[in-house]
Image (cartoon, rainbow, N blue to C red):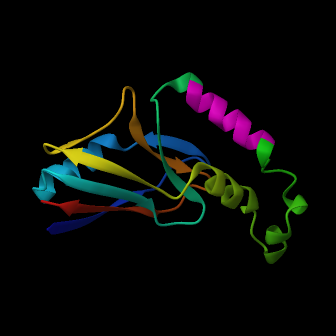
Amino acid sequence: MKSYRKEIWFNTPTRRAFINMTPQVQAAIHESGIREGLALVNAMHISASVFINDDEPGLHHDYEAWLEKLAPHEPINQYRHNDTGEDNADAHIKRQVMGREVVVAITNGQLDFGPWEQVFYGEFDGMRKKRVLIKIIGE
């Protein structure tokens, strides 16, 4: 069995963003030479997420609205975490809800998705450099 590791870096110009990173994951699979196996895609920061869903702007808007109702950014003094001088407690909660990582099957050198599935990076406390790990194992 072979393994391959790659880091992808994001620095969003906004506090929150959803970025389709499916092309980068597929490129890493191609670079790895692995034809059958698994791809782990993991946000390596506690205020960012990786998830699978549809690449549809209305859905992304709905996520944003729902997450903001669930864990509103302001007032920042509503969160004990922000007593440390941070202002990103909401981002930690949003990440917890949206998830840390995904695992996708690789079949014949391709991501083995269901209809409409894509891999997304979710940023909840942006405007600084953060990384995502892609780890591929298989043959």
**Residue at 74% from the left image edge and 69% from the top image edge:** 86
85 left or right, relative to 124: right
Q: Where is residue 30 in the image (x, y as percent from the top left)?
A: 14, 50
128 left or right, relative to 86: left
Q: Position of residue 24 (x, y in %)?
A: 28, 47
Q: Tell me the quarter of the image containing the N terminus.
A: bottom left
Q: Which residue lies furthest to the bottom in this view?
A: 84
Q: Main secondary structure of the magenta part?
A: helix
> In the rendered image, which quarter is residue 59 located in?
top right
121 left or right, relative to 138: right
Q: Position of residue 39 (x, y in %)?
A: 30, 55
How many marks overall?
A: 0
In the image, residue 67 above or below residue 123: above
In the image, residue 23 above or below residue 32: above
Q: Which of 107 and 71 is in front in this view?
A: 107
Q: Tell me the quarter of the image containing the C terminus.
A: bottom left
**Residue at 34% from the left image edge and 48% from the top image edge:** 104
Q: Which of 32 and 19 is in front in this view?
A: 32
In the image, residue 114 above or below residue 95: above
**Residue at 62% from the left image edge and 55% from the top image edge:** 95
Q: Does the magenta stretch include residue 114?
A: no
**Residue at 36% from the left image edge and 31% from the top image edge:** 114
In the image, residue 66 above or below residue 24: above
Q: What stretch is highlighted in magenta?
A: 59-69
